[in-house]
Amino acid sequence: MCGIVAVIGSREAAPLLLEGLRQLEYRGYDSAGLATVKSLEGEDVGTLTCKRAKGKLKNLSSLVSNQAAPGHLGIGHTRWATHGKPEECNAHPHRDSSGRIAVVQNGIIENHRALRKELEAAGVIFTSETDTEVIPHLIARELKPFLIRGASASGAVLLEAVQKVSKQLKGAFALAVVWADTPDALVVASRQAPLVIGLGEGEFLCASDTPALVGFTRTILPMEDGEVALLTPLGIELYNAKGTRQQRIPSLLRGGDHLVDKRNFRHFMLKEIHEQPETAELWVERHLPAGLPVESPVALPFDESFYSGIERIQILACGTSRHSAMVGAYLLEQFAGVPTSVFYASEFRYAAPPLAPNTLTIGVTQSGETADTLAALRMEAQRRDEHGDPAFASRQLGVTNRPESSLSRLVPNILDIGAGIEVGVAATKTFLAQMLAFYGLALTFAARRKSRSSDEIRELTEGLRSVPNQLRTLVQTHDELSESLAHRFADTQDVIFLGRGINYPIALEGALKLKEISYIHAEGYPAGEMKHGPIALLDPRVPVISIAMPGVVFEKVLSNAQEAKARDAQLIGVAPEAPGTEIFDALMPLPEVSEWISPLLSVVPMQLLSYHIAAHRGLDVDQPRNLAKSVTVE
Ligand code: F6R
């Protein structure tokens, strides 16, 4: 979490930093800050100005527009609080006691308590509760001998100090450092946290994510694990963790990485829900081109060796990505016949099951940066490498919307879900795209293992081809319908979501969407589980949203809904207008599609209803409290 941006160049840094931070605000919005160093000739050369504001970036922007922050060198930060409340004193940048060194950091310094104690014992007075504040003080301690010797300050001196300090820090972090004594040097470091250098015209930038760079340059150099770089107006010096100079050719950002824009929608989330037909259409174009043989029904970027000998699959993910993984596991097991398990990445790390041979591990992460998912994948690869038996060797696939993210540097195979940048913190179109990725995998495994007949494979493939148009109609009609239903939830405090089989993960996803953006308590249950306890929660004040799609569990779900109705719950059905569905007090109608396809459609009313309930309550839909889009802390 947290976004950092830094620039050194020939124009004023503050406006660039603010624009970069605006693009990174999805990473956290508890507070924001920037520090600039005046670097041109003049009286106040080498002046460090620091501005910080609690709350969203707009507070910092108005502060900076009233009180100048001059300089062509600067660092900025947008924070998602980990250590210390979202107060101004905890906002970044943090400075050393002289106020001449400033640091922004994204990540967690795990040994900050011990370091703080050590520094306090040496007389340092801390002004924040953050883990980050130890860094400027440690850098100051490293610089002291240089200054005592009377050596002149230079970028090389700052670089060496940051390299030394990095070695003292435990944890995963990305940081950017400026020193008022070196107005022509910016030092950045990255350890298991993303940082991308941008090579602009007459300027160099660095940011946690590419959207902060695209307004300025498309030439980028993603930093690798453990690297430290010195950026000066003349160029970049890049060093690995051992201090060896690195030479790498920069790459060009893909066309899809664009500046974030709401178009005419009130919120990014609504825009992204409306983009789903296009997301599905693109997926069909890319992966289901006409003329593919039934033995290989999906165009995927893997060769024979990727599939050979896979006997089971385990999927690691968090949050919404885990829900898509659950739909995926259902398809891989029930359609393709491959035993598949899904784990919370955060649990898997500390309680992984005993190793099984010939296992494909799939990490699903929209951002490609989720610390728990990355750490779980790293841990799994390591224990398999240590095993030694080739049957247990690590085989990993990453499913992500950000193929340039840290995930791609960790796993050998990437499946790019290609949904385009998603800004709303609540995942919508990327959830759909993740599910589609699993349809592609399940069809491929089913065809290769011959676990389904050619007709069944063709039927599912044809079903998928119809999804973009079905979504198009659905998004339009349900937008209006959800808006009109939303007022019913004005005083609602609890909502129950029910689903079964392939739609159980959609019930979980519906509950998660509602919780995170409307702050209404919501739970998703497998419908058959209600009678084992949760039914005690029901009364007329608790709406029950039940997904009932024709298929193996249709009648069962209707009976479960009936049980809720008998307890006077308000029943909302997400179901086709089919016999039996008249029991619902309100119906969010879906077309009658095969049960296999249904999650791709049933999720839309969930997303739109949550959106309209939150918007109706006047909440900040795109940036809900306490959340961030990219969870880079454990
Ligand atoms: C919910 C949501 C989160 C993320 C979770 C994992 O709308 O967005 O639950 O799904 O934080 O993030 P990624 O997919 O980036 O690993």
Image (spheres, rainbow, N blue to C red):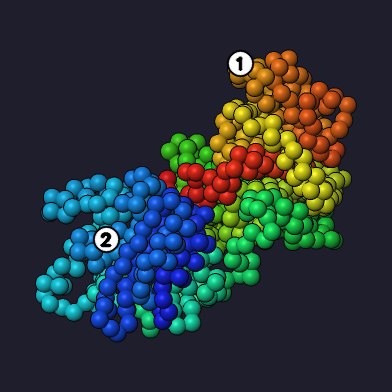
Q: Which residue is mark 1?
A: 536
- Vertical placement of residue 184 versus 101, above or below: below
Compared across the picture, whether 382 is left or right of 163 comes to right
Depicted 314 relative to depicted 145: above or below: above
**Foreground disc of the pair 1, 2:** 2
| Label 2 element class | strand
Q: Residue 583: horizontal and vertical position, in percent? A: 81, 23
Q: CA distance from mark 1 to mark 2?
A: 54 Å
Q: Is residue 61 visible?
A: yes
Residue for point 26% across, 66% down = 101
Is residue 393 shown left or right of residue 458? left
Q: Secondary structure at mark 1?
A: helix
Residue 582 pos. (x, y %): 84, 25
Position of the C terminus, as image quadrant, is top left
Mark carried by residue 146: none
Amino acid identity at mark 2: Arg
* Neighbourhood count class around disc 1 (C-alpha, 10 Å): few under 14, some 14–19, many 20 upward: few
Q: Which residue is mark 2?
A: 95
Examine the image and state in which quarter residue 586 appears. top right
Rendered residue at 85%/38% (across/down):
592
